[in-house]
Image: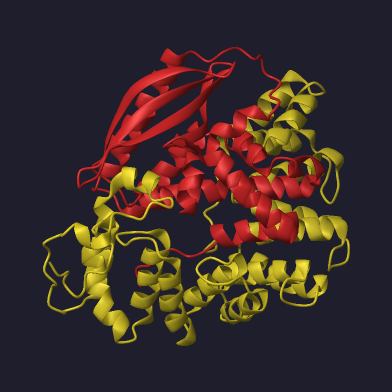
Amino acid sequence: MTMPKSVPMGVQASQRGLGGLLRSRGLTLLAAGVVCLGISATSARADFQAGWNAYETGDFLTAYNEWLPLAEKGDTRAQFNIGVMYDEGKGLTQDRSKAIEWWTMAAEAGDAQAQHNLGLAYLAGTGVSQDYGEAVTWLKRAATSGLVRSQYALGRMYDYGFGVAKDVKEAAKWILMAAEHGFDKAQYNMGKRYRDGVGVKKDPAAAAKWFKAAAEQGHARAQHHLGIRYLKGEGVKKDPVAALMWLTLSARAGDKSAARERDKLMEHLSSAQRQKAKSMADQWRPVPKKADG
Amino acid sequence: MRLIRLLVLGLLVSVTTAHPAAATATSPEEAQRFIQKLGDEAVKTLSDKSIPLSQREEKIRELLRKNFDLETIGRFVLSRYWRTATADQKSEYMSLFSEYVLKTYARRLGAYSNEKFKVTSSKPLGSRDAIVLTQITQQAAGQPITAGWRVRDTDNIYKIIDVMVEGVSMAAAQRSEFDSIIQKQGLTGLIEILRAKVSAFSARSS
């Protein structure tokens, strides 16, 4: 039986189920052709939105059939999404080298998210040979067009000297850009940089400010650090109740060392102070994430 | 695929980590109830097509986060390098590793539905844990898969610390993969690879 042209090898994977997930390691996914879906290729009235609607319900085959003709005609959104389907094994047998092919097409046409994913694939060596230089090239293109995740990832490459000469100032420049756009991980990183003077001048007040920005978005480590700043009065006015509130929030978010700090601090506070910190923590709500991170 | 290793990840973990909590044995019966309940909830979430995929994945992610002992697993997987890592590396690794596991599984599981999930048996494992065996049957085709969930009771909180698929510990598989990365590229290299893996963009609507 021949598979319809628009049904790729392995498209039956969406029917594969959890069992298939568990099994997929190494065991070749049931030879793709074996399972005949009996689905005929829909004639190519491709529609990006219809593909997206199908994707959201988990009907990956329909999504693929809508997007493939668009992708072949150069629609970078469709190319990007098909790349993701291959990368994540959604509806298609996971095939990272195919993901790379689609993302490369979209990236070369200027699609920033595709540039970002491609850069990361080179960084991790998934679907392509690891190549830090290529990783930097693509991340820089995406970062320049304003993607905060790429700005942050690029900054880390400068921090470590991966694919570029190590340059903590250049790292700080890119990470600050992402922090200013509201990316919580970058804000947390800027907090540490200002605390320790890495690529920027030491500045306890700026450190506290950036920890706070990330903490308010629910970043557990930043909440921990902010709690410590209030406890010691570094860069902020000493405030043991605020310290307890932030350590409590961090502990609730799963930070175990914050839980230890919280317990230590509680011993030194009055029950009124503890009560106040608890009620502040109970009422606290994260501000919505500002960036695409 | 790597994924799988991950998923099945945790079992091994137990061996290493020195949990200060009282080392009482985990009741196989309780562990079985725990896994049954978790499996039922996962299947229900995955088959609810009334909410968009991204939200189903988010729910699965929460479910996994609550029920996997990611810290124990993460430490086990890093093995001897944990002890020599700096405090900053530890915290960065741990947060990236957790995110990596959750994101990978949530994204993959988001693709599935129509599984039947059946607990078949449970028994003690080692001196502290229990292993719960399950059969997962797919609608489309294929043999049922046997997965074993290693569960540990710490102060009456049950968590999964490894998954065995067809006898292979996911945590062990992950550990050897990380070990070879660290040997070539150092812990920093591993951390950057994890960062890369968690920060890719997923499919988009426009």
Q: Quadrant of residue B40?
A: top left
**Is B202 left, or right, of B138 in this rendering?**
right
Placement of A169 over or under B20, stated as above or below: below
- Residue at image position (77%, 67%) is A159
**Is A254 left, or right, of A54 in this rendering?**
right
Rendered location of residue B153, percent (x, y)? 54, 19
**Is B131 left, or right, of B186 in this rendering?**
left
Placement of A124 over or under A275, stated as above or below: below
Is residue A145 in view from this perspective? yes
Which color scheme did the rendering employ for the protein? by chain
- Residue at image position (70%, 30%) is A259
- Residue at image position (30%, 53%) is B52
Placement of B204 over or under A23, stated as above or below: below
Rendered location of residue A214, percent (x, y)? 65, 53
- Residue at image position (70%, 73%) is A174
Q: How many marks?
A: 0
Q: Which one is in front, B21 or B204? A: B21
Name the quadrant of the N terminus of chain A: bottom left
Q: Which one is in front, A240 or B55? A: B55
The picture's colour for chain B is: red
Rendered location of residue B70, percent (x, y)? 58, 37
Rendered location of residue B175, percent (x, y)? 62, 44
Name the quadrant of the C terminus of chain A: bottom right
Q: Which one is in front, A270 or B112? A: B112
Is residue A254 in view from this perspective? no
Give the letter of the yellow chain.
A
